Structure formats: C-alpha cells, structure tokens
Image (spheres, rainbow, N blue to C red):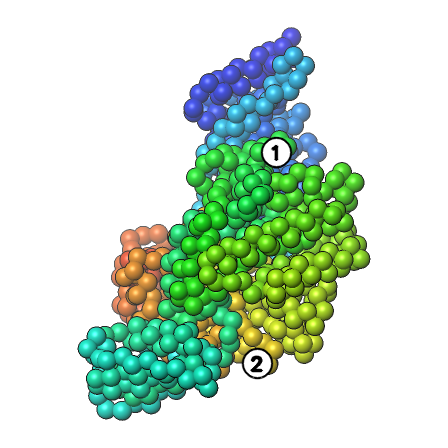
Amino acid sequence: MKTFIRLLSVVAFITLTACSSNPPMSIHWEMGKNDVTPGVCELYYTITNLSDEPITNEGWTLYFNYMSLHPIYTEGDQIRQTELQASYHSITPTADFQPLMPDSSRTFKLRFKGNAIRQTSCPEGFFLVKVKGENGKVKSGKPISIPCTYAPFTRPEQMKRGIVTWEKTPYADGAYVYDYVENILSGEEKFVQPLLPQPKKMEYTDGVCEVAKAEIVVRTDANMLSEGYTMIITPTTITIEASDEAGIFYAKQTLKQWGEVVPCGRVTDYPDLHHRGIMLDVVRNYYPVDSIYRILDIMAYHKLNVLHFHLSDDEAWRLEIPGLPQLTDIGSKRGYTVDESECLLPMYCGGWDPNAPTTANGYITREKYIELLRYAGARHIRVIPEIDMPGHMRACKKAMGNLLTDSAFDARVYKSAQNYTDNVIDVTKPYAIEFIDHVVTEIVKMHEEAGHPLTIFNIGGDEVPKGALTKEEHQAFIDEVLAILNRYNLQPMGWEEITHFCPAESKAICYSWLNSDTQPLEMAEAGYPVVLANANRLYFDFAYCNHHEEKGLNWGGYTDEYRSFDWEPLIHPNVIGMNAQLWGEVIRSFSQVEWQICPKIYGLAERAWNNRSALTLSEYNRLVYEVFVPQLAASGSNFHIQQPGVKPVAVDSSPLTVAMNKVMEGGEILYNFDDGEWQVYSAPVAVLEGTKIVKAKVQYLGKESNTTWLWLEEEHKVDAGAEEKNTGATF
C-alpha cells in the first residue's frame, strides 16, 4: 500500500510539472568552506518544493554544469551527485531521500574535491527531467528549467583560501590591494606621448600640425623593415615612408591615436615581433561573429596583427564546412540529449534547449567567415584558424557518428585535462585523414575566395590524454596531417606539445603556453619558431586578481593589465611573436569578452611591439587609465577597472585610521563601515569604534569596481578556526 501511495505521489508530481510552465522546485546555492578535509570543499544546496505535491525519491533527475569541482558521494546521503562528463553533473535522490512536502525546503551539504574560491564560479544551467514507466518502458519528460539563486560570499572563510589549496597568491583584501596600487604608482614619470604601443624613436622640432589640414604624402622604400615606418611631420605636411602597406597603415594608426593635433618632428618605428595576436575561443561559448569586428578594430588601433581563431573543441564545432553538414547541424548545438544524435551534451551555462539563443548554440557560416577574413585583412590582421587534433575532438567525433570512432576504440580508458573520457578520434581509421583533408581543403578555399590566402594552419595538438593513443598511432597521424598541410604550402602551428611529434625541420610554429622559463628557450634553440603565450601573463580568461567577486579561471595564476606589461619577454632570433588567449569557459556574453580583454590588451600591444619597453609601470598605468580606458568608455565598449586599496595607517592620536588609494587619477572612492551608508573618500578616515569590516569601491567613467574588504577584528582576519555554518543540513 505504501508503495502504491508513493507511486501515485510521483505520478502526480510528474503530471503537474509536465502540464505547468511553472518550475516544480527551486535551488539555492551557498559556499560553505574550503579544506574541510585536505583538498575538499563543502557546499550547500537548498531545494524548495514549489509544486502542490510531495517530491519523493523516484522519477526525477536534476542536471546542471559546474566546472573544476568533482563530487564525493557518501553512502547514506539523501541525494547523489554524479559527474557525468567534464562539467556536466546530475543530482538524483537516493533510497534514503525523505519526501519533500509542498512549500518546504531542505538543505543538503555536499563535498567536492577542489576549492570554490569565487562566488562567480557557481553551478549553472539547472534543469529537471522526470521519468516514468509506460508499457514496461522508461520515458523521459521534457526538461524544465529550474531557477537558482546564489548566496554572496560574506564570511572570511569563504573568501580566503584553504590552507592546503595550491593557490599561493594572497587574497586581494584591502591591505594587499593598497600595497599593489602603491607599487604601480611608485617611480619617476616623464612626459610620454598618448600612444600604445610607443614608437621606437621620436625626435621633436618646433610647432604642431593639424592633421585634418595637412598634406599627407606616402612613399615606399623596399629597404625599410617590414611593418616599420617613418613619419616626418611639419606644420603643413606629413610624410610617411614604409616598405609595405602594413607600415603605412600603422603610421596612420599612430596619427589616429595622437588625435587632431600632433607634434612636429620625426618618428621612426617598427615592431620587434611580427606575430602580435589574440586567440578567441568561440567554441566553449559562442558569440556572433559580427561582434568580433569590434575586437578587430581595437587590435588594429594598437597594431596587433593576428587573430588566432579557435573553431573546434570538445564542446562544439563552430565553422560551416561544405559537404559535412553534421558538424554544425549537431556539433554546434548543446542541450538535453540521451544519445547526442541531435545535439551535444550541455556544457557551461547553456541549459537544456539546443535551439535557444544562448552562448551554447551557434556557428559561423561560410559566408560570414569570408566576410570576417576581408574585414580583418583590410586592417592588416591575419586570421589563423585552429582545428585542434587529435585530442579536443569530442564535438566532431560525436557529430560524425561512427566515422571517427568505433566501439573498440571507445573502450580505451583515459581522462583528458578537462575530464572528458571520449574526446580523441580513432586516428587509425582511414576516414580520420580523409576528414582532416576535407576540412583543411574547404578552409583553404574560404581564404582564397576572401582574397587572403592561408599560409599557416593551427592543428592544436595539445593535451592528448595518456592512454588514448599509442605513440606510434599519434606520430603516424601527425605525419599524414603534415603531408596535407605541405600539399597546400601551409606552415603548421600548434601548442608546445606538438614538438613531440613535429620535427624542427617542419618549421612548426610553437605556442609556449605553460608557465615555464626554460621551455620557450629550449624550443627556440632547437630551431622551432616560437610564439610566447605564457599562461600567467597572457591568458586573458584568467581572473584579474584573487578576489571572490572576480570572474575567470586561475589554474595558472592571474592576469591583469599589469601582468601583460610588467615582464621582460624572451628575446631570441626564433621567438617570432606574442599571443594572448581568451578561452571561452568563463564567457557568458560578448560584453564579457570585452571585459576580459580590456584593458589587458594594452600590455600585450606594448610588449609585442617593444620587447624592452621604455615605459615605466606608472607611465604605462597613466596611459591606460587617463588615455585609452576613457576612449573605451566613449566608444561604448565594456572594460574592467581596478579596485581600490584600504589600509590601516597611524594618523595623529586617532585609535585607528584607514587610508585608501586607486590607480586612476579620475573617479572617486566610495567606502562604508560594516555595510553602512556609502561615503566619498577624500582623506584618511578615522574608523568608528567596534567596526569589523571596511569596504571600498571605485566609480570611474560609469563603471564600478569590485568591492575591496578590510577585516579589522582579529577573529575576522583568518579562517583557520572559523565556526562552521549551522544549516540544518541533512546527510
């Protein structure tokens, strides 16, 4: 009888939610604490029953995405969380699950391997699927989107890192940021022209020139350095000399940056590196190709000349290839699926609907790609496509069915860096090479039609998991791929792992992306052309700093506008370039693309053009925040601004006083004590007795920075003995 009643409850729950547009439940997520045991964090999920029927332990599964953390299941828990594939997770009730009555909530405490260090890195895309039996068969209902709310980080143990986590960078609290800002602002400053990158040499004479009224004379000189130029500026004439169209274009960008009136004199300029690029990943999360034009305009304005286009990966295939409609019919969409015959599994934030206009879905048509090539070419930007192989190929593998794999190959056991267990193609299949040949051929045709013939093809070649291929299989595949590229006179390019399979005589261009000081030198000494792509300097998808409100990854460190500038890149004849990467895992809109890139792009532009920049850190900072960030604001672009510092200082006889600072001259700092009223900061402030937390933020050019926290009471400064939150959680 009890079983019958329980079954009726399940059927009622399924019927009600299937017929209603209202979600049957909601989720509330809250961070607990890192390192509850070594390397394990604790999180809280609160489920609220919004329906009119009990939620029992039968007939439902909750799906969602959560990056980087791996669930730990303990017998006796009422719910079980499973990592289905990479970031795709499910929650199902166990036999111990107690019915959740209407309008009731229950909090579950779950543990994960890893650390949760940012409130922006939360589970996303929740949806519910009900199942029921009909005629002896199990049938899934239509997915239902489930709302989720998130508790902000408010306790020190949430923000500060666990004692055994690998992360060594201090949390960006008030005192840390204050010292960081002071370092940026310190040092002597001289007058510098409002230009990035700075020209190699500027010699001034008396007078100025109004550009709009001046005669511009252009001359070519084949003996000059490629992409270099000279400008002789008088009050009435601007003479540009260059060896090529690119040099002429860059001279005009210098004039454009200078503005309406420029100083008279002579400018001599040329780049130190001829590959100055940005990689955009439109695979993990997609944004319309037309929006990329805005990035191309910023790149051209600062003399960057390579768009490295990451077009395929495990999570999607984003470029239309004539003759292979499956790649985009299936491989460009993500949503709820049992067998991935119509779309790929949900990843990141896309949710369950493969036809929804989200960042999960979409692709670049052949026509749009050709238009992009022409737009970029007009700005002297080369587009280098990347089709990553033989790993990172899950999307095309699933889209092409058994053509790129079979059951025997799929039985191989491995796990990729992103926790995929099936992202390598069977390179021994004859069709594998036919497939690559077809893709390369069609992309070559697109570039030819655009009028910008392809000369370099990026084959990726990174992170092939151990156990997926034998060394002999891997080598034979790469040899055949190199033969295809050679047939089209294409220079191979890839991540630094390709040195294991591409000999130096192949002239394969290698991206040095790991945080190693020796690897790029070793590759250059071995004869490989090297592009510097250091993760801890040039991965623009990394968070700006170690702060709980920042968006972004941090597995290799943090990158802000200063990290991309404040270093001395390797100088070697075989170091041909510098490339920043914007991987798409953290991207949720094109607005965030701009936010992750700007103002980091300025350090890349200066260092790629001038390896040994003459700018000091403070001079560079002034250019960024007083010249170029205001231009971004005027153009309507999105951008990030640095948060303020807050530090206790001794002033007269005051018991406790705090000083605040910021990197920009303009704008203002707002502060409060213990979440009181926000006030404008003008001078060191006496702290009210009993204050526990001082908070501060910067408002500048219509933007607001993240809020800096400074804990004043001793028990708020450390997390080692923090009291565990009492949630009434069930186990």
Disc 2: which residue = 571
Query: Can you see residue 500?
Result: yes
What is the quadrant of residue 571 in the picture? Answer: bottom right
Q: Residue at x 55, y 23 (%)?
A: 141
Residue type, mark 2 in image: Ile
**Depth check, front residue: 353 or 455:** 455
Asked whether 143 or 231 is in front, the reply is: 231
Mark-to-mark CA distance, 1 and 2: 50 Å
- Residue at image coords 62%, 50%: 438
Answer above or below: position of 310 versus 646. above
Q: Quadrant of the N terminus?
A: top right
Q: Is residue 436 left or right of residue 192?
A: right
Estimate how packed mark 2 is, as few (under 14), some (14 to 19) or many (20 or more) residues with alpha carbons within 10 Å.
Answer: some
Residue beneath label 1, please?
341
Q: Residue at x 65, y 71 (%)?
A: 507
> Secondary structure under badge 1?
loop
Label 1: few (<14), some or many (≥20) within 10 Å?
Answer: some
Q: Of the residues shown, which amino acid type is indicated by label 1? A: Ser
Secondary structure found at label 2? loop
